[in-house]
Image: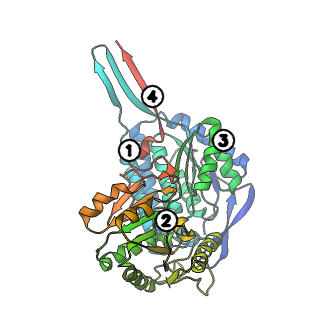
């Protein structure tokens, strides 16, 4: 186990606050401690980032891209260690953790390859008007516990590519892979360009209020996102908020459910359902609900539950005890409402935070399991009578991150734009790509990530109006 420290100003720094135990979700026991920062150490990290920014902002686009290529190579060189850390602290199977590390490398290289254009708005004799993009300054990043390494990369890399410096605070549930990532990055980047702190809510709140942070990027719950937005008003921070999702899928009448069951299960139970853009509620025509549930239950029965480093495991635990308690409460409420638990519906009788993959039928909108984001290994399958009803039910949510329509491609594509969400997939779900903007509507967020649109959110437009 490496020596985990904060990284401030390019140096390994011990945390001055009480260490935070890091729990292995496959055992429910702490396996190490994470250093924790005080608010004073956060101030030091912001100061270090500001000093690095003073030079970095004037580096060329080519230098920024080259730096990210060095980071990508350094992540690759430490891939095995990083994947092991993700498994230990997050709980996912090793193959999925390896995919997360590989995705981190790919996203870093995609950010390195992006070009920031200068837009010529007017060009005539004696007049030229150009729109340039300038970096903002110090970017703060607060990341969640479900994809700790990948989302850290999603936040850090475009910030650096645009010419900013970064202070990142990972979730206290999963701090280790991010701490190690920043240590690795510090070996190939200028000192202070990326800094890491760990802490509970107090540190995150201080980041939202900090006058030295020009932009804050947050992935997590809508409730916390609202709190960040209120606290960020002091210096009118730029915000990118990727918040909760309660993604709906509509399976069109007459669709061959057996042909799509694997895809539906994979995108609903991705990372044990602990993915913002995972499929969270499924609407199926009343004539096909029973068949759909049986097919999904058969796939659930094939899953091998266990610790992420155990051989043959395909399905890991819920990441933490509070989230497991939430999943249990939602399923028990559904049971009390008369729902049919098709499969699963209980914790495993073993140490750790294991909950069997669960399919629930016999519910509709107006029940907690349908209306609230479960963020765990449970999927409600809801019957509808008409496609119009299905669309209305799918849209009857305060959230709007993603949605999908499954069935005949032409019919599904025609229906898809009627869903009220940031991304609509046809015959798929939960696919996010480094070259495609991704963000939510309604209460699911502000701004977008990825691609040129996501990169430009780390910049300030400046108009250059030239006469003569």
User: Which tag, 2 or 3, sits closer to the chain's start?
Assistant: 3
Compared to residue 402, the image places residue 159 above or below, namely above
Looking at the image, how many numbered discs can be counted on the residues?
A: 4
For disc 2, the marked residue is: 275
User: Which tag, 3 or 1, sits closer to the chain's start?
Assistant: 3
Q: Position of residue 211 (x, y in %)?
A: 65, 37
How far apart are labels 2 and 3 at the CA level?
A: 29 Å
Q: Is residue 101 among the parts visible in the rendering?
A: no
**Residue that protrudes farthest toward the left in the picture:** 410
How far apart are labels 2 and 1 at the CA level?
A: 23 Å
User: Which tag, 1 or 4, sits closer to the chain's start?
Assistant: 1
For disc 4, the marked residue is: 462
Q: The N terminus is located in which quarter?
A: bottom right
120 relative to 217 in the view: left or right:
left
Q: Nearer the viewer, residue 280 or 377?
A: 280
For disc 1, the marked residue is: 452
Q: Quadrant of residue 45?
A: top right
Q: Residue at x 43, y 55 (%)?
A: 421
């Amino acid at each position: 186990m490496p020596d985990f420290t904060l990284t401030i100003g390019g140096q390994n720094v011990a945390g001055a606050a009480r260490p935070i135990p890091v729990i292995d979700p496959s055992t429910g026991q702490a396996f190490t401690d994470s250093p924790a920062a005080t608010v004073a150490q956060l101030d030091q990290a912001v100061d270090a980032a500001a000093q690095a920014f003073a030079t970095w902002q004037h580096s060329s686009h080519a230098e920024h891209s080259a730096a990210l290529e060095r980071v990508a190579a350094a992540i690759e060189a430490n891939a095995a260690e990083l994947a092991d850390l993700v498994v230990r602290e997050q709980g996912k199977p090793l193959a999925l953790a390896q995919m997360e590390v590989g995705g981190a490398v790919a996203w870093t290289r995609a950010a390195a390859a992006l070009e920031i254009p200068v837009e010529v708005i007017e060009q005539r004799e004696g007049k030229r008007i150009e729109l340039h993009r300038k970096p903002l300054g110090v970017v703060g990043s607060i990341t969640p516990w479900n994809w700790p390494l990948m989302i850290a990369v999603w936040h850090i890399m475009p910030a650096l590519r645009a010419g900013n410096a970064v202070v990142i605070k990972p979730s206290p549930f999963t701090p280790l892979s991010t701490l190690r990532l920043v240590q690795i990055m510090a070996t190939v980047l200028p000192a202070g360009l990326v800094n890491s702190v760990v802490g509970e809510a107090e540190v995150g709140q201080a980041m939202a209020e900090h006058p030295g942070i020009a932009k804050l990027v947050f992935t997590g719950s809508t409730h916390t996102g609202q709190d960040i937005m209120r606290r960020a008003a002091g210096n009118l921070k730029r915000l990118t908020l990727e918040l909760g999702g309660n993604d709906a899928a509509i399976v069109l009448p007459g669709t061959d459910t057996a042909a799509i069951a694997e895809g539906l299960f994979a995108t609903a139970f991705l990372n044990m359902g602990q993915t913002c853009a995972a499929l969270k509620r499924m609407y199926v025509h009343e004539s096909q609900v029973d068949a759909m549930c049986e097919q999904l239950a058969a796939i659930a029965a094939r899953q091998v539950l266990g610790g992420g480093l155990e051989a043959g495991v395909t399905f890991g635990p819920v990441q933490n005890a509070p989230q497991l308690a939430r999943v249990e409460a939602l399923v028990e409420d559904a049971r009390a409402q008369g729902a049919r638990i098709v499969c699963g519906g209980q914790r495993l009788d073993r140490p750790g935070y294991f909950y069997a993959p669960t399919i629930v039928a016999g519910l509709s909108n107006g029940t907690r399991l349908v209306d609230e984001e479960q963020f765990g290994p449970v999927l409600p399958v809801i019957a509808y009578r008409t496609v119009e009803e299905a669309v209305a039910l799918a849209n009857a949510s305060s959230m709007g991150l993603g949605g999908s329509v499954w069935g005949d491609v032409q019919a599904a594509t025609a229906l898809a734009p009627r869903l009220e969400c940031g991304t609509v997939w046809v015959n798929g779900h939960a696919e996010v790509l480094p070259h495609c903007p991704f963000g939510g509507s309604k209460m699911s967020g502000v701004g977008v990530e990825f691609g040129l649109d996501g990169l430009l959110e780390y910049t300030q437009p400046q108009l250059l109006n030239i006469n003569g």
